[in-house]
């Protein structure tokens, strides 16, 4: 029987612990690399098209107002928030928050990002199923992501299978949340591009550029899901290794 159990690069066992290499770390590293690549890609794409002025001259805030009103939404306020790419829609307070790089910019990138967030407001208005489900899962996902690793580590250290299982189940809640997020984000982009085209807010060439921006943004969510699935696989491998011990 192997007396040592690997946890995040350390080996724990009946004789204490020391340094060692956990081979499952490769899964965590791969997930991190995927996330970093996706993040770099979206920033690069946004920066490229943030220098392309939209023909309409509309700023992100102005475009957002037009998109919302065209969908019959008048109870959502638009606010400026600090940071870059910190744009988001708050369904609880009915607020569309646009970052400094979006709110007052009249670039193609700014208009598309603002319209994408409006897509979430439209989803909220029509009670889009995946969005409702994601909102329901938020507290469970937060609970799972905060407690899964500590509980799992405790299970490894004290060789308690129930704790290992509980840690994996809790982490699954966070994974399910991210999986549900994918259709929400893709649908918001689809709605945004359709409205921008129908209302002639962007021309054909601008729409093509806008698709690149929103596609790059969507890949960050895909990378996040891939990273979480790799982490889940890592937990399962570690748990099975403890069972064999």
Image (cartoon, rainbow, N blue to C red):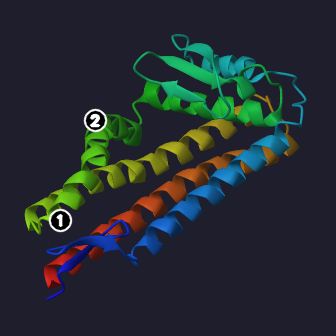
In this rendered view, identify the residue nearer to me: 13 or 115: 13
* Label 2 sits on residue: 139
- At horizontal 43% and vertical 15% (from top left) the residue drawn is 93
Instruction: Check the image and report above or below for 62 versus 222.
Output: above
- In the foreground, 26 or 98: 26
Label located before the other in sequence (2 or 1): 2
Q: Residues within 10 Å of mark 1 (few under 14, many from 20)?
A: some
Quadrant for the C terminus, please: bottom left
Q: Examine the rendered structure and indicate whether residue 25 appears above or below residue 153.
A: below
- The picture quadrant where one finds residue 138 is top left
Residue 47 appears at what percent x and percent y? 80, 42
Q: Secondary structure at mark 2?
A: helix
Tell me if I can see residue 71 in this picture.
Answer: no
- Residue 77 to residue 175: above or below: above
Q: Residue at x 14, y 74 (%)?
A: 14
The residue identified by callout 1 is: 157
Depth check: give the residue in front, 146 or 192. Answer: 146
State the residue at coordinates (89%, 37%).
52
Name the spot of residue 240 as percent of width and height, x first.
21, 78
């Amino acid at each position: 029987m192997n007396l040592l159990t690997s946890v995040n690069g350390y080996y724990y066992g009946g004789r204490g612990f020391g340094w060692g290499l956990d081979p499952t770390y490769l899964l965590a590293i791969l997930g991190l690399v995927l996330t970093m690549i996706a993040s770099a890609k979206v920033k690069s794409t946004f920066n490229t098209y943030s220098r392309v002025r939209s023909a309409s001259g509309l700023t992100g805030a102005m475009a957002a107002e037009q998109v919302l009103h065209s969908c019959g939404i008048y109870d959502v306020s638009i606010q400026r928030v600090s940071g870059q790419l910190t744009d988001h829609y708050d369904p609880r307070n009915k607020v569309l928050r646009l970052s400094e790089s979006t709110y007052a910019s009249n670039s193609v990138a700014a208009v598309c990002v603002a319209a994408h967030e409006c897509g979430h407001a439209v989803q909220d208005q029509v009670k889009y199923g995946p969005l409702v489900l994601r909102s329901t899962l938020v507290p469970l996902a937060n609970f799972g992501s905060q407690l899964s690793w500590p509980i799992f580590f405790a299970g490894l250290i004290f060789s308690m299978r129930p704790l290992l299982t509980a840690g994996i189940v809790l982490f699954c809640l966070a994974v399910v949340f991210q999986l549900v997020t994918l259709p929400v984000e893709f649908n918001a982009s689809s709605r945004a591009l359709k409205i921008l085209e129908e209302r002639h807010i962007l021309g054909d060439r601008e729409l093509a550029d806008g698709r690149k921006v929103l596609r790059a943004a969507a890949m960050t969510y895909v990378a996040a899901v891939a990273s979480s699935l790799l982490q889940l696989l890592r937990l399962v491998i570690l748990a099975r290794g403890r069972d064999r011990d």
